[in-house]
């Protein structure tokens, strides 16, 4: 790994100008307001959370949610929830939405649930109580149900009848443009389903969204696949090409010194998951000692310093060390060492060839991994793509043996889509799931079964999470790397505060009166081009 110059040494010496964007905001929904963003990972999920609504919405607070279409709820017992719906709700097409629509949608969902938790195995009844209240009754214990509700969206009958959103391992809510949902934005053009998407998705503000404070911007263009180097150039060297994009951690100085962009960083519960293909990959990886040796050969401290540019935290697990429960387990338990001797590491790894499948956005990390593992005689061969859909096509077909690309190690930008809950990572250990590429493991299966039915308030919950973490680490089911921060380039005239997990709140983003889409003059002033000090957000679970 070429170390080069540590740009961080210069960042504190720069003569910054003040960021006064919050004192200069443009009119809400200015008719020409428009931003362009790049979402290289889980674009379908980010878009769905901006174009759709459920009863609740995941949020950066102590509870982890806020009410969306629901006004309130009460959990009567282990199986029963009663919800009160907001008054005056409307679909994006202007049609009224009420309890009957909730029941229609939930009954459809029950027959065709998504396949990335365990809700597809859970039966429930929905009962109308009056025009604003309804009851959901589970048929069996399931403690992830309420959190799942933030991902159960409501659609017009037209969308359901025409596009038949049968649940699958990724998304079904963004199959086509049109006013079919209830979220703050409407898809005007394009689609995004995870395993397939258009290169660009156009969004326009929903005039019927129940919360009249949002959205703030009229039009948003989302790019789902761009070359990472070109994306960096678009946001740092030009105005009007990109307004927000994640960047490689070693490109921070490029952003800070840009005429048009500023750097925004936050602690995060996002993850970088690096799978070992234990279904049809290199037979050498079936040897647990080889996987342990690969993990032990890594120097996470050096990765954090030289590849991550200190934008993250050391983690003993694949799950982010920023999850509150994971943080608590690290603080109160002795994490197993899973030690392999230095002599054994060299013997096991020398001459090992690994076929890598990854998006180009992770090359900064892969080059760091390659540099370290080369010292032990490991060779990387790369298959690189700009599109996450190529990653899904191979990953999600591996368990069935239908993948068309040979891979031994696959890198996935596993942003925290389930939100402040390590299920985001644990789903890859679920036996026979399309997300899993590990052999049958009855021990971890039992731990996951327990996870589904244990409340976070139950004293047993912490032990169950610990059991899953320790089992996955002991079996070395993944290559474990540091937990990343969010590191983003943002147009200087855009106001953006990142969420800790896998939500980019497009509806909350604002622009200033000097943004390229609304200002009444052409050339961006030279004084505005001066660097803005990076903004860092640190999250406290008590907030």
Image (cartoon, helix red, strand yellow):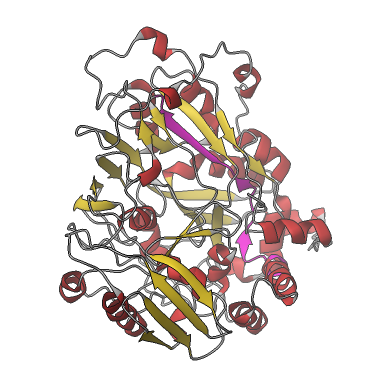
Q: Is residue 522 left or right of residue 264?
A: left
Relative to 435, residue 371 above or below: above
Q: Is residue 75 left or right of residue 507?
A: right
- Closer to the camera in the image, 403 or 142: 142
Q: Position of residue 35 (x, y in %)?
A: 30, 35
Q: Is residue 128 left or right of residue 256?
A: left
Q: Residue furthest top?
A: 526
Q: Residue furthest bottom?
A: 139
- Look at the image and say whether residue 182 sits in the magenta stretch: no
- Look at the image and say whether residue 485 sits in the magenta stretch: yes
Is residue 430 visible in the rendered image? The answer is: yes
Residue found at x 76% / y 61%: 329
Q: Which residues are magenta?
A: 473-492
Looking at the rendered structure, the number of numbered marks drawn on it comes to 0
Displayed quadrant of residue 229: top left
Q: Position of residue 84 (x, y in %)?
A: 41, 72
Displayed quadrant of residue 403: bottom left
- Closer to the camera in the image, 517 or 466: 517
Residue found at x 32% / y 32%: 242
Relative to 258, residue 345 above or below: below
Relative to 451, residue 178 above or below: above
- Closer to the camera in the image, 318 or 240: 240
Displayed quadrant of residue 218: top left
Is residue 189 visible in the rendered image? The answer is: no
Residue found at x 52% / y 28%: 252
- Closer to the camera in the image, 189 or 339: 189
Q: Position of residue 352 (x, y in %)?
A: 61, 56
Q: Position of residue 402 (x, y in %)?
A: 36, 73
Quarter of the image where the N terminus is located: top right
């Amino acid at each position: 790994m070429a170390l080069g110059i540590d740009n961080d040494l210069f960042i504190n010496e720069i003569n910054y100008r003040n960021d006064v964007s919050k004192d200069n905001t443009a009119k809400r929904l200015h008719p020409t307001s428009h931003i362009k963003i790049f979402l290289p990972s889980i674009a379908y999920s980010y878009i769905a959370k901006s174009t759709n609504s459920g009863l609740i919405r995941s949020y950066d607070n102590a509870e982890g949610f806020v009410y969306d279409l629901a006004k309130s709820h009460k959990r009567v017992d282990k199986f029963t929830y009663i919800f009160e719906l907001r008054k005056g709700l409307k679909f994006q097409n202007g049609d009224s939405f009420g309890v009957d629509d909730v029941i229609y949608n939930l009954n459809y969902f029950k027959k065709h649930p998504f396949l990335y938790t365990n809700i597809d195995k859970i039966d429930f009844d929905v009962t109308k109580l009056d025009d604003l209240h309804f009851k959901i009754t589970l048929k069996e214990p399931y403690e992830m149900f309420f959190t799942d509700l933030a991902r159960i969206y409501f659609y017009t009958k037209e969308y359901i009848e025409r596009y038949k959103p049968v649940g699958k391992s990724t998304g079904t809510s963004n199959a086509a443009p049109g006013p079919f949902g209830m979220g703050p934005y409407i898809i005007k053009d394009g689609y995004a389903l995870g395993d397939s998407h258009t290169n660009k998705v156009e969004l326009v503000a929903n005039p019927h969204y129940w919360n009249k404070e949002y959205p703030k911007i009229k039009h948003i263009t989302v790019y789902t696949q761009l070359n990472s180097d070109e994306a960096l150039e678009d946001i740092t060297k030009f105005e009007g090409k990109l307004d927000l994009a994640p960047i490689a951690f070693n490109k921070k100085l490029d952003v800070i010194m840009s005429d048009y962009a500023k750097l925004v960083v936050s602690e995060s519960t996002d993850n970088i998951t690096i799978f070992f293909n234990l279904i049809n990959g290199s037979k050498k990886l079936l040897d647990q000692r080889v996987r342990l040796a690969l993990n032990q050969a890594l120097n996470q401290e050096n990765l954090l310093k030289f590849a991550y540019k200190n934008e993250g935290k050391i983690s003993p697990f694949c799950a982010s060390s920023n999850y509150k429960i994971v943080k608590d387990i690290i603080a109160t338990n002795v994490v197993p060492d899973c030690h392999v001797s230095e002599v054994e590491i060299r013997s096991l790894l020398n001459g090992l060839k690994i076929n890598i499948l990854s998006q180009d956005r992770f090359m900064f990390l892969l080059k760091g991994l390659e540099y370290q593992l080369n010292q032990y005689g490991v060779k990387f061969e790369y298959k690189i793509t700009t599109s996450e859909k190529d990653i899904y096509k191979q990953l999600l077909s591996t368990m069935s043996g239908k993948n068309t690309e040979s891979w031994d190690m696959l890198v996935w930008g596993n942003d925290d889509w389930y939100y402040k809950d390590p299920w985001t990572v644990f789903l890859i250990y679920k036996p026979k799931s399309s997300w899993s590429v590990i052999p049958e493991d009855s021990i971890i299966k039992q731990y996951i079964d327990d996870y589904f039915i244990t409340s976070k308030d139950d004293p047993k919950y912490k032990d169950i999470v610990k059991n899953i973490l320790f089992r996955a680490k002991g079996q070395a089911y993944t290559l474990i790397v540091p937990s990343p921060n969010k590191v983003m380039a943002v147009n200087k005239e855009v106001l953006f505060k990142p969420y800790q997990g896998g939500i980019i709140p497009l509806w909350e983003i604002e622009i200033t009166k000097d943004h390229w889409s609304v200002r009444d003059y052409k050339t961006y002033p030279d004084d505005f081009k001066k660097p803005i000090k990076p903004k860092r957000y640190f999250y406290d679970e008590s907030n």
